[in-house]
Image: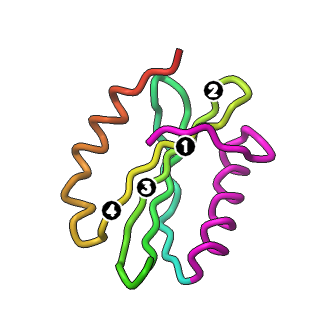
Amino acid sequence: MVKEEKFSSTKLDVVVAEAEKYFTKAFGTIAFSDPKSLTVDKKDAVMITFSCKISGMQMKYEYVYLAVGSAVYAITFGGPESSFDALSADYAQILSDIRFE
């Protein structure tokens, strides 16, 4: 999913801090990996990955944030933690094919 999101800034370090705070409040016990810098459509981006329990299921998510003009977009991948990593090549392919106009 690609979706415009509202943050107080388009600076990616601010976006990550706000997102992590929101996810922690929403999910409680959550395990984040270190943010990873990357590019999407030749734009600087940052990826956060985290695991949490939702309705008794252990889930894993990747959120990729980038600024396009004055808008911040989130590209989201998610699924059961047990099968999530097996699809990482698919996520990379999807990210390489995304274009913003």
Q: How many marks?
A: 4
Q: The residue tagged with tag 3: helix, strand or loop?
A: strand
| In the image, residue 21 lies in the stretch drawn in magenta | yes
Q: CA distance from mark 1 to mark 4?
A: 16 Å
Q: Position of residue 52 (x, y in %)?
A: 45, 76
Closest to the observer, 24 or 39: 24
Q: Earlier in the sequence, mark 1 or mark 4?
A: 1
Q: Earlier in the sequence, mark 4 or mark 3?
A: 3
Q: CA distance from mark 3 to mark 2?
A: 19 Å
Q: Is residue 88 left or right of residue 13?
A: left
The amino acid type of the residue labelled 1 equals Ala
Q: Earlier in the sequence, mark 2 or mark 1?
A: 2
What residue does disc 3 label? Answer: 62
Mark 4 or 3: the one toward you: 4
Q: Residue at x 59, y 81 (%)?
A: 28
Q: CA distance from mark 4 to mark 2?
A: 27 Å
The amino acid type of the residue labelled 3 equals Glu
Residue sitting at the far front: 55
Q: Position of residue 64 (x, y in %)?
A: 50, 45
Residue 26, above or below 40? below
Q: Earlier in the sequence, mark 4 or mark 2?
A: 2
Q: The residue tagged with tag 1: helix, strand or loop?
A: strand
Q: Earlier in the sequence, mark 3 or mark 1?
A: 3
Closest to the observer, 83 or 40: 83
What residue does disc 1 label? Answer: 74
What residue does disc 2 label? Answer: 68
What residue does disc 4 label? Answer: 79
Q: Residue at x 51, y 21 (%)?
A: 100
Q: Is there a contact, CB below 8 Å, between mark 3 and mark 2?
A: no
Mark 4 or 2: the one toward you: 4
Q: Is there a contact, CB below 8 Å, between mark 1 and mark 4?
A: no
The residue stretch that appears in magenta: 1-28
